[in-house]
Image (cartoon, rainbow, N blue to C red):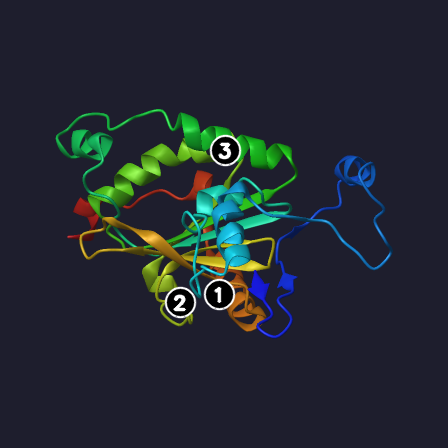
């Protein structure tokens, strides 16, 4: 949202609405002219809009907080691409701790499967590419075991050993790329603990570079069903 300092006019950036049912409902309350469009502003923007109207807003304010990649996936229209390049993520997950202690490490990814199934049902193609070291870390072995749930939910997952990616130019952080329009970078602390706030950009140049990086990984990577983790003992 932008407020013109000279005229006081408001400019809104939001999701363009093309659903004819929504447009028809809006038209019931007033005419929609040929040079006008309907955009959707999420409810979390309400306080920010009110602050702008009152003249109390702060530059770069984010309302109740920026959307995270999971929220954006729930509104994606066509594609969602995820590039992962770390060998370990949150080490405190109870199922991972169970895996390291000799247990099965299994748990039901019910919420995530539901989000993926809903997106795929809307026609969204979800691809996940993972660049991993070999021999794999314990975390990757655990993650590989769980990936059958991602695939069953509708994701297309591929794996690329790091030694086959050495000549690729890749970003310094994992990212999601939605509808070839918005890229969201994910960050972790040194021990793999997720850092909550993500960085996002719709800059066409950044989006294009991330798309190219993902596709370069994807064309070399092995589909999940064909990728078998090497036995650490065979590497010795």
81 or 4, which lies in front? 4
Nearest-to-viewer mark from 3 and 2: 3
Q: Measure how far apart labels 3 and 2 are at the Cα level.
A: 26 Å
33 or 71, which lies in front? 33
Label 2 element class = loop
Label 3 element class = helix
Q: Who comes first in sequence, dot 3 or dot 2? A: 3
Q: Measure how far apart labels 2 and 1 are at the Cα level.
A: 8 Å
Identity of the residue furthest to the left in this view: 101
> How far across and down, in percent of the image, does residue 190 sit?
19, 57
Tag of residue 213: 1
Tag of residue 37: none
For residue 227, above or below residue 161: above
What residue would you read off at disc 3? Answer: 115
87 or 202, which lies in front? 202
Residue 219 in view, yes or no? no
What residue would you read off at disc 2? Answer: 171
Q: Are marks 2 and 1 in contact (CB under 8 Å)?
A: yes
Nearest-to-viewer mark from 2 and 1: 2
The residue at 55%/73% (across/down) is 205
């Amino acid at each position: 949202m932008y407020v013109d300092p000279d005229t006081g006019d408001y400019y809104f950036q939001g999701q363009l609405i093309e659903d004819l049912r929504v447009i028809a409902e809006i038209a019931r309350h007033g005419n929609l002219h040929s040079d006008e469009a309907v955009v959707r502003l999420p409810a979390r923007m309400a306080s920010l809009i009110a602050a702008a109207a009152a003249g109390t807003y702060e530059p770069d304010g984010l309302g109740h907080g920026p959307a995270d990649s999971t929220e954006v996936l729930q509104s994606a229209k066509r594609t969602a691409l995820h590039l992962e390049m770390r060998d370990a993520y949150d080490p405190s997950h109870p199922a991972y701790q169970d895996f390291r202690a000799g247990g099965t490490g299994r748990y039901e990814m019910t919420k995530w499967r539901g989000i993926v199934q809903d997106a795929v049902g809307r026609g969204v193609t979800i691809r996940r590419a993972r660049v991993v070291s070999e021999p794999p870390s314990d975390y990757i072995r655990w993650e590989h075991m769980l990936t059958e749930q991602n695939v069953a939910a509708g994701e297309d997952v591929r794996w690329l050993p790091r030694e086959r990616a050495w000549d690729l130019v890749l970003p310094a952080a994992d990212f999601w790329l939605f509808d070839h329009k918005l890229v969201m970078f994910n960050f972790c602390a040194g021990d793999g603990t997720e850092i909550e706030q993500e960085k996002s950009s719709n800059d066409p140049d950044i989006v294009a570079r991330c798309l190219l990086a993902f596709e370069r990984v994807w064309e070399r990577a092995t589909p999940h069903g064909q990728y078998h983790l090497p036995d650490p003992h065979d590497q010795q």
